[in-house]
Image (tube, coloured by chain):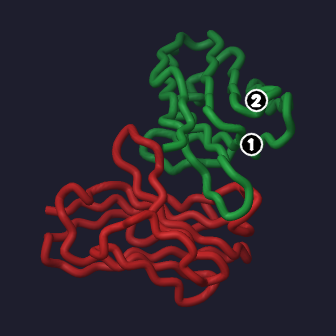
Chain colours: A red, B green
Amino acid sequence: DTEVTQTPKHLVMGMTNKKSLKCEQHMGHRAMYWYKQKAKKPPELMFVYSYEKLSINESVPSRFSPECPNSSLLNLHLHALQPEDSALYLCASSQAPTGGRPLHFGNGTRLTVT
Amino acid sequence: GQQVMQIPQYQHVQEGEDFTTYCNSSTTLSNIQWYKQRPGGHPVFLIQLVKSGEVKKQKRLTFQFGEAKKNSSLHITATQTTDVGTYFCAGILNSGYSTLTFGKGTMLLVSP
């Protein structure tokens, strides 16, 4: 069981679609993250939110748009994606963004872009 | 750019054999974390090492952090089929806001 909940578990979308991935945590963590993971590769950092403010954007294309409505919620809005964007998208949270606190990952959303 | 190297990429052992994965960085790490990802699952935090020369144990798992804080290892004694998965090390290359840099992972397969 994970304390970070992601929906949906699976998503298939066309290149012209707009969709959103959702993430929720109720551990009182103040840092939340989006990672992208391709098969047999490590998680690759996309965005970091610290105290509900975007603090790191790892040069992610604008077709990915993060949003942090409050300290418990994190969204990733998707628009005009490419087939190469198909991957497992992982949300994670940590107590704070500094000091190397452990990451708590959600189960992920497996995204297929057709 | 700065990287955390991890070897081997893959290891297949018979149940009961030992297993070790190694992590190396060209720069000093302020700390290092280890994660396990089961097939089809998500990474799960195992442990964090902070001090130079630190050794921590979790049942059959032994974690070490090098004296120079540039390398780390995870050793599993007498593997079981439940140990199957990919083990990632992840280090903080700088202090402060810096985020984790993940190694490429070692995939462990255990045959009964």
How crowded pointer 2 is (Cα within 10 Å; few <14, some 14-19, many 20+) is rated as many
Q: Is residue B66 above or below residue B40?
A: above
Residue B79 at what x, y percent from top left?
A: 63, 19
Q: How many marks?
A: 2
Name the residue beneath numbered marker 2: B63
Chain letter of the residue carrying label 1: B
Residue B38 at what x, y percent from top left?
A: 51, 40
- Residue A69 located left or right of residue B45: left
N-terminal of the pair, mark 1 or mark 2, is 1
Name the residue beneath numbered marker 1: B47
Q: Check if mark 1's residue and mark 2's residue have beta carbons within 8 Å.
A: yes
Chain letter of the residue carrying label 2: B
Residue A2 at what x, y percent from top left?
A: 61, 60
Residue located at (54% from left, 42% from top): B2
Between residue B17 and residue A57, name the one nearer to us. A57
Residue B50 at what x, y percent from top left?
A: 82, 43
Kindly indicate whether the residues beneath marks 1 and 2 are on one polypeptide chain. yes
Q: Residue A113 lies in what quarter of the image?
A: bottom left
Mark 2 is on which residue type?
Phe
* Residue A5 visible in this rendered orientation of the protein: no
Residue located at (47% from left, 69% from top): A57
Q: Secondary structure at mark 1?
A: strand
Q: Is residue A110 above or below residue A8?
A: above
Residue located at (54% from left, 10% from top): B14
Mark 1 is on which residue type?
Ile
Q: Residue furthest bottom?
A: A69
Q: In the rendered image, which quarter contains the N terminus of chain A?
A: bottom right
* Residue A2 visible in this rendered orientation of the protein: yes
Residue located at (62% from left, 10% from top): B17
